[in-house]
Structures are given as C-alpha cells and as structure tokens.
Image (spheres, coloured by chain):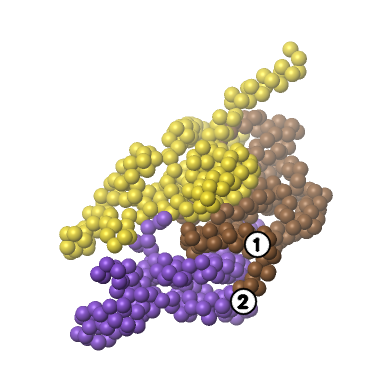
C-alpha cells in the first residue's frame, strides 16, 4: 500500500465520521439565521432538529453517567462537553423562540392559510390552535361580548383594511450567495441580477424567497 | 437571550464565528471528544489540530494550547491591506468574519500573535477606513431596488443592517410602483448627465 | 404588503388633516364646519382627516361628481418642495407633519397632479436625510452639539431610523467592551 492509498483511506474515514455531525450543526446555524432574518415563517427543519435533539439527549445521558467520575482528565472533558451542550441548547431554543414569535405575530394569517400551517411542526400547530383559542376566549369575555354581534370578528376586512396581520414579503433582507444564481426582479420589469457565490446583497425578500428555500442564498 | 424577532446581535454574530474551525498547537494531551457539532481527534502535542474557535479559546484560557493565527492576521499582511484600503475607493477583500475573528483572537490569545498591539492598531485603522467608505458610498448606493455590498464582512453588514433595511423599506413605500419607474428613468438619465447637473436643473 | 390594522403609525397617518373642497351641497353636514344643523355648501374649503377625505373623495354621487376634491397640504406644497430640493436637511419635517413621508405616500394616491415630481423629491429627501441621521446616531455630537436642531425636526419614521442606528452602535460598543 503506498502513501496515496493511506491518505485516501484516511479521507474516507473522515467523511464517514466527522462531517455529518458538523453538517447538521452548520445547517442548524444556517436555518436559525434564515429564520431570524426572513419576514415570513419558514419550513420547520423537522429531521434536522430531531437528529440534533437525539444527540443532545445522548450527551445529557453521558454527562449524567460520568458525573461522579473522579478522574480529573474525564472531568475536564466533561466540562468541554457541557460547554458545547449549552451552546447547542441556546441555538435550538433561539430557533424555536424565533418561530414562536412569528407564529404569535401572524397567528390568524397562518391559521387561515393551509400552505403556511403545513410549515409548522406538530407541536407548533398545537400551540397555535390552543393559544388562539385561549386568546379568543379572553377577548370575548373581557370586551368583545359587549360589542354588537356583527362587530365581534377578529378577522374582518371591512373598510378595505384586513384585521389579519400578514408579513410584508417585500421587506428588505440581507443575504450572502452560496451558489451562483440569477434572480429575476419583477419590479424592474423582469431584470435579472446575476448573483455569484460570496456576493452580498440587500434585496426584497419576495425576489429571493425561493433561492433561500433551495439554499442558493443564505439570509444574514 | 435577544428577543427572537430582532436582528442578530453582535454577541450572536460572534457566537456563529466561534463555531468556525481554527488551528491550535496543543500543550497537553486530550482524548477525542464526541461533541454534538463535531467529533474531535485526540490532541497530541505538538501536532497541530483544527478545533472550533470556542474550544480553542477555552483551552487557551487554561494554557492548554496555543492558537495558530490565520494567515491574514499578521502585521505585514494587515499593513498591505490598510494601504490597499486607503488607496482604492473599493472595499478590499477581507475574510467574511474578519472583525469577529480579529476581536476574539486579540482578546483571548494576544500572546499567540506576533506584535498584537500593532495588529490591533491596523485592525482599528481598517475598521475606520471602511466605516468612512461605507458612509461615503451609501448616499449613492441606497435605493429601493437592490444594493450590492460585496466584500463587507458579516459584522460590518450587521452593523448597518437595521437602519439600512428601514431606509430601503421606507424608500419602497415612498416610491410605490409608479415611483420606482420614475427613479429608474432618473438613474438612466444620470448615466448620461452628471448627477450634479441633474440637481441644478431642479432648482 | 403587511397589514396596517393594528399599526399605530398607520392610524396616526390617517388622522393627519388635508385641505378639501366640497363639490356638492350636503344636507346636515354643516357641523363639520362649525355650523350646527346647517347644510354643507358646495365650494366650502375645509381640512379633513385623511381617513374621511379618502372616503368622500372616492365616493361618487350621481355618477360623475365626487363629494369633495382634495388638495395638497402645506407640508407638500411647492414652497416646501423647493426648500427640500435646495437643502433637505434645513427643513423641520416634524413641524409640517409627524408622519411626513406616509402623508406624502397617501397624497400621491389621492391628488392626481401630485405624482412624479413629488415622489422624486420625497425619495431624494428621505435618502439624504436618513444617511445624515444614521451618521448622527452612530457618532453622537451631544444634545447641544452641531445638528441638534436637525434632529429635533425628524418626523416619525426618521426617528425610528435614528433609534435603529443608535441601538446597533450601542450594541456594538457593548460587545467590544464586555469582553475586555
């Protein structure tokens, strides 16, 4: 076996082990930032969060097993593991809270739009429905019941203004291009902006919505 | 934790940066670790190894490793960049996370850098030069359609994002559909005439 | 487009008054002009809030006529536009209207001869002023320093931009010092 082969084997070994965990973590970082920057709610990263949560659970078990181990070396490793666990927990918590904030803000809009509802995880859907039911009950008992029946709706659009709050999909977003992509912009008569990997742009979200979902650009 | 509907805070931008790999020279052995985000190899001095920046900082604080600074973070290179930055009206090509990396490394392992105080000085010059450029170029760049911000680092983008985003949104609302056509026309005319001449006609 | 139902700035914009002229006699509406129980005479000039003017300007009576015609408010008049063209930073927009640009946006849709030039001037004004505003927010010159008069004259969306720029600059400073 010559040297080439050994390094090839080592590289394969690497590919099997390290990157998949790293890839998941990088993806979570990416979707967290995307979610923070996008005006609308994005697809819940179901499998990704599940895989990472499994690792979080295993890590917590590992820490519990090792607590009480008096070997200073094991103890030091445990501190590192715990530090990282806290970092991952922060990330997941902030990701979920960002989504909850959007669900709260555009609750009625999401509830009444099936394509948006399907972007939520099952627990987010439950949260949305129960939370809205509770709010409705509260509004009704505290003031709506004193209104004439035809003025009690919370989703009226009389007078040309809808009561249902929707995200402004044309609001400006900042992005970094991951893969070369041509973005067509409707408001400039269909002009195309050639975006090249590494470029940074400010543009209306509606123009790059699909590119975000395909991973061609990352919001920042 | 920042309120989740807000833009990324500088701390969060730094958090993202801490997930990047950096090369270290371990001073002590450390077994491999099965972390959630990465499986690290055993650290054996003096073999170099790549670890996430947060771990490098952690080990460095306990004097268990030395950090190998990235190639660009040297006095010579920064001197060149400062010169380039002040000679050219364009933004020099800096690493995407240059500000975060420089701040974190200067802060946690200055002793691993060669002449850290000079490096800090150059980083500050770069930052001031680029901030002045951003300020000078924005009046001509801001519009309601799209803006190219190539070669700005993530932290630099995040520093102007909240208000620039509001200005772009505000312009879109002022200009509306009809307005954006008017502005486009003006932009086209601006290619032929000088912008100043254009202004004079208006008086 | 985001919804404006619960948007306080949109509600306050709606309450800003604009000059209107009644095109027809309206029985019993005299109270708007302070004449209780009287009729509103055609030709009466009156300032009405945007929300009301909008409804009256677009409702057609007898097919062709509208109840009122609307005119540009002083804030968007030619002298103000000329002052803005000469030096956008010298005008106190807040005194003219608290939601100045939003008022402009609404008037462009309401008054026919407004259109292009008005939009152009507003957009140039907004760009030049906001960049100056961000500059002040990031490099504060003190309450009595140079430019404090300009900052007093910011209208609402400009104040929000000042706040956004100021908060980011503060957060940056906070991050850089907390590590030390």
- For the point 61% across and 39% down, the residue is A180
Chain letter of mark 1 equals B
- For the point 17% across and 59% down, the residue is A149
Q: Are marks 1 and 2 on the same chain?
A: yes
Q: Please tell me whether mark 1 sits on a helix, a strand or a loop.
A: helix
Q: The purple chain is which one?
A: C
The x and y percentages for residue B61 are 67, 46
Q: Residue B16, can we see it?
A: no
Ranked by sequence position, the earlier of labels 1 and 2 is 1
Q: Distance between the residues labelled 1 and 2?
A: 17 Å
Q: Nearer the viewer, residue C1 or A2?
A: C1
- Quadrant in which the C terminus of chain B appears: bottom right
Looking at the rendered structure, which numbered label has been put on residue B190?
1
- For the point 72% across and 48% down, the residue is B93
Q: Which chain is brown?
A: B
The x and y percentages for residue B29 are 68, 32
Name chain A's colour: yellow
Asked whether, in this view, residue B45 is left or right of residue A84, the answer is right
Q: Residue A15, can we see it?
A: yes
Using the rendered view, name the quadrant where residue B195 is placed.
Answer: bottom right
Asked whether, in this view, residue B9 is left or right of residue B102, the answer is left
- Local packing at callout 2 (Cα closer than 10 Å; few below 14, some 14-19, many 20+) is few
Q: Please tell me whether mark 2 sits on a helix, a strand or a loop.
A: loop
The x and y percentages for residue A22 are 57, 34
Using the rendered view, name the quadrant where residue A6 is placed.
Answer: top right
Q: Nearer the viewer, residue A87 or A154?
A: A154
Residue placed under numbered mark 2 in the picture: B203
């Amino acid at each position: 076996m010559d040297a080439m082969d050994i390094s090839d084997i080592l590289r394969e070994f690497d590919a099997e082990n390290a990157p998949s965990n790293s890839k998941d973590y990088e993806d979570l970082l990416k979707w967290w930032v995307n979610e923070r920057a996008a005006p609308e709610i994005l697809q819940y990263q179901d499998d990704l969060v599940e895989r990472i949560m499994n690792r979080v659970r295993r890590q917590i078990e590992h820490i519990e097993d090792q607590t009480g181990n008096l070997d200073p070396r094991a103890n030091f490793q445990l501190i590192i593991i715990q530090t990282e666990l806290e970092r991952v927990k922060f990330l997941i918590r902030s990701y979920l809270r960002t989504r909850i904030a959007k669900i709260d803000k555009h609750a009625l809009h999401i509830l009444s739009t099936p394509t948006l509802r399907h972007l939520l995880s099952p627990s987010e859907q439950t949260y949305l429905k129960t939370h809205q039911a509770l709010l409705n009950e509260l509004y009704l008992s505290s003031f709506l019941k004193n209104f004439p029946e035809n003025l009690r709706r919370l989703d009226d659009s009389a007078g040309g203004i809808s009561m249902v709050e929707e995200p402004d999909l044309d609001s400006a977003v900042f992005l970094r291009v991951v893969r070369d992509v041509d973005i067509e912009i409707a408001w400039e008569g269909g002009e195309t902006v050639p975006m090249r990997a590494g470029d940074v742009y400010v543009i209306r979200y509606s123009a790059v919505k699909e590119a975000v979902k395909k991973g061609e650009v990352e919001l920042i | 934790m920042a309120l989740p509907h807000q833009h990324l805070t500088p701390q969060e931008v730094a958090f993202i940066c801490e997930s990047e790999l950096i090369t270290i020279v371990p001073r002590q052995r450390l077994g491999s670790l099965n972390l959630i985000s990465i499986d690290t190899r055993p650290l054996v001095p003096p073999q170099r190894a790549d670890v996430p920046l947060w771990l490098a900082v952690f080990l460095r604080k306990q004097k268990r490793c030395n950090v190998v600074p990235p190639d660009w973070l040297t006095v010579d290179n920064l001197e060149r960049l400062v010169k380039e930055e002040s000679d050219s009206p364009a933004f020099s090509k800096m690493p995407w996370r240059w500000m975060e990396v420089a701040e974190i490394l200067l802060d946690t392992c200055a002793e691993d850098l060669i002449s850290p105080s000079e490096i800090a000085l150059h980083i500050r010059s770069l930052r001031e030069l680029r901030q002045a450029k951003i300020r000078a170029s924005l009046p001509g760049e801001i519009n309601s359609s799209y803006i190219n911000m190539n070669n700005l680092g993530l932290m630099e983008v995040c520093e102007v994002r909240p208000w620039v985003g509001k200005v772009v949104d505000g312009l879109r609302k002022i200009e509306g559909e009809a307005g954006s056509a008017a502005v486009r026309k003006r932009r086209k005319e601006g290619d032929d005439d000088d912008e100043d001449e254009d202004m004079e006609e208006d008086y | 487009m985001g919804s404006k139902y619960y948007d306080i700035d949109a509600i306050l914009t709606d309450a800003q008054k604009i000059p209107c002229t009644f095109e027809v006699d309206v029985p019993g509406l005299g109270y708007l002009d302070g004449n209780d129980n009287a009729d509103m005479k055609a030709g009466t000039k009156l300032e009405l809030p945007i929300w009301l003017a909008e409804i009256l300007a677009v409702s057609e009576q007898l097919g062709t006529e509208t109840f009122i015609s609307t005119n540009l408010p002083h804030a968007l008049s030619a002298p103000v536009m000329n002052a803005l063209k000469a030096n956008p930073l010298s005008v106190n927009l807040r005194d003219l209207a608290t939601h100045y640009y939003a008022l402009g946006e609404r008037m462009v849709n309401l008054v026919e001869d407004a259109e292009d030039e008005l939009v152009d001037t507003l957009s140039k004004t907004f760009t030049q002023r906001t960049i100056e505003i961000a500059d002040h927010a990031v490099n504060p010159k003190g309450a009595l320093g140079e430019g404090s008069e300009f900052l007093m004259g910011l209208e609402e969306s400009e104040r929000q931009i000042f706040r956004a720029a100021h908060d980011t600059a503060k957060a940056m400073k906070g991050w850089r010092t907390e590590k030390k």
